[in-house]
Amino acid sequence: MTERTEHVDVAIIGGGPAGLMAAEDLIDAGIKPTIYDAMPTPARKFLMAGKSGLNLSHSEPIQKFLKRYGAQEDRLGDAVRQFNSWAIRDWAQGLGSETFVGSSGRIFPNSFKASPLLRAWLARLHEGDAELHTLHRWAGWANDGALIFETADETVHVHAKATILALGGVSWPKLGSDGSWLPFLQARGIRVVPFRPANCGFNVDWSDHFKTRFQGEPVKNTILTFGGDTVKGDFVVTKNGVEGSAIYALSAPIRDSIEQEGPVALTLDLTPDRTQEQLAAALARPRGKKSMATHIKKATGLSGVKTGLLHEFLTKEEFTNPGTLASRIKALPIILQSPRPIEEAISVAGGIAFDELDDHLMLKTMPSVFCAGEMIDWEAPTGGYLLTACFAQGKQAAEGVVAWLKAKD
C-alpha cells in the first residue's frame, strides 16, 4: 500500500451534523475545512434519523429546553443558547427548507425529509470550498503528529493546523458511529466515560404466546410511570421487550436504576381517560352470557394488545375480581430486565469527559485538537435535543479553532 502526505488548514474527522456544522462556520470565518469520513457518503445517521420525519429541534422555552441535558446542562448551555431552536429554523430556511412547529412542539422541515436539506447543505459547503473525502478511515496519529487515514489504495498522512474530531458514539455502528476512535484517544491518556445506551428499548421476558401474538403491535394512549417520572404516549411491543418514544423518554432513569438494582418495574395506566372507580363499577356489572374478553372490552374499551398485557401479567383470580382488575388496568407493572444492546440505541451516554476539554472544546492535553457531538459525555432525549446539541457543539468547536489559529498567528 502506498503512502501519501498532504497539508490542510483544518481537518474535520466525521461528516455528521457536528462536523458539517463546524465546516460551515469555518468557511464563514474564511478558513478552508477538509472533511474526512469513513463511510461512502456523509451524515448517514442523520439521514436514517430523518426517515420517520427529521426532528431538527424543539420550540419549548430555553430554560426548559436546557433541562433536557440533565447533569450536563451547564456544559451545553452556552452553545445551545447561541444556536437555539429559532436559529436552527433560520439556518434551515437558508438552505431552502422551511420548517414548522408540530402539535408536540417539535420542529420539522415542511418536507419532513432529511435528504433535501442535506443535499443543499453539502452543496453550500462545496461552494464554500470545503473538501470532502469519503472512505477515509481515521487510524490515529503518526509519531510526527500527522493524522493517519486508511483508504482502499493508500495510507494518507495529513498535517493540519487544527483538527476537529466529530466521530459520534457507538450506536448504529453500521452507519459509521462505531467507536473505533476510542483506543487512539485512550492511548493519549484522554479519559473516556464508558458508553451506555440512551433512548433505548428494554428486554422483557414475554411468554411465547404473547411474543408470537403481539410483537410489532403499538400500545397507544398510555401513561407510563417510573420513579417520579410520568410520560403519556405510545410504545411498541417487540420480540424482546418494549421500545418507542414513550419508553425512550424514561430510558435514562430506567437504565440507571437497572444498573444499580437489577430488573425494575415500569407501571402502565392503560386507560388514562377513565378512573379506577369508573372501571370497577363497569366491570362489576353482570356479564351474562358474554365472554370475559367481550365483557372487558365493553366495560373498559380495552382490546388487542392491551388486553394481552393484562393476560400476560395477571392471575386468573385477579382477572375475575372487578376491583383488582380495575386497579391493575390503572397501574399494571411490567418488569424490565435490561436495556437492549447499545448498537440498537438511538443515542448514547458517555464519551470524552468534559473535564478533558476547555471552554472551546479543545483537549487540554492536546492543543489544536477539538471535539464535538456525541463522542462527548452528554445525553438527551429524542425530540430534537440531540441534533440541536450536535449542531451547537459543531459551531462551538469551530469558533474555538478560529480563536486558536488567530492566537497562533
Image: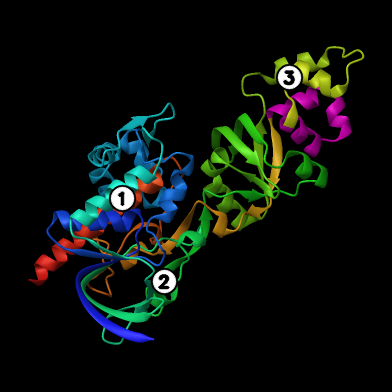
Residue type, label 2: Trp
User: Sequence-wise, which precedes: disc 1 or disc 3?
Assistant: 3
Residue to which mark 3 is pinned: 300
Q: Main secondary structure of the magenta part?
A: helix
Indicate the quadrant containing the N terminus: top left, top right, bottom left or bottom right.
bottom left
Circle nearer the viewer, 1 or 3 = 1
Residue 391 numbered mark, or none: 1
Question: SS of the residue at dot 1?
Answer: helix
Q: Nearer the viewer, residue 381 or 106?
A: 106
Where, by quadrant of the figure, is residue 4 drawn?
bottom left
Residue 327, placed above or below residue 254: above
> Which segment is the magenta one?
305-330
The kind of residue on which mark 1 rests is Phe
Toward the viewer: 344 or 299?
A: 344
Residue position for label 2:
181
Q: Which mark is residue 174?
A: none
Residue 377 on the magenta span: no
Residue sitting at x 38%, y 42%:
67
Distance Cα–Cα, label 1 vs label 3: 46 Å
Label 1 vs 2, first from the N-terminus = 2
Position of residue 62 measured from the top left corner of the image (x, y, whole percent):
31, 37
Q: Is residue 328 visible?
A: no
Q: Residues within 10 Å of mark 3 (few under 14, many from 20)?
A: some
Say whether marks 2 and 3 touch (CB < 8 Å).
Answer: no
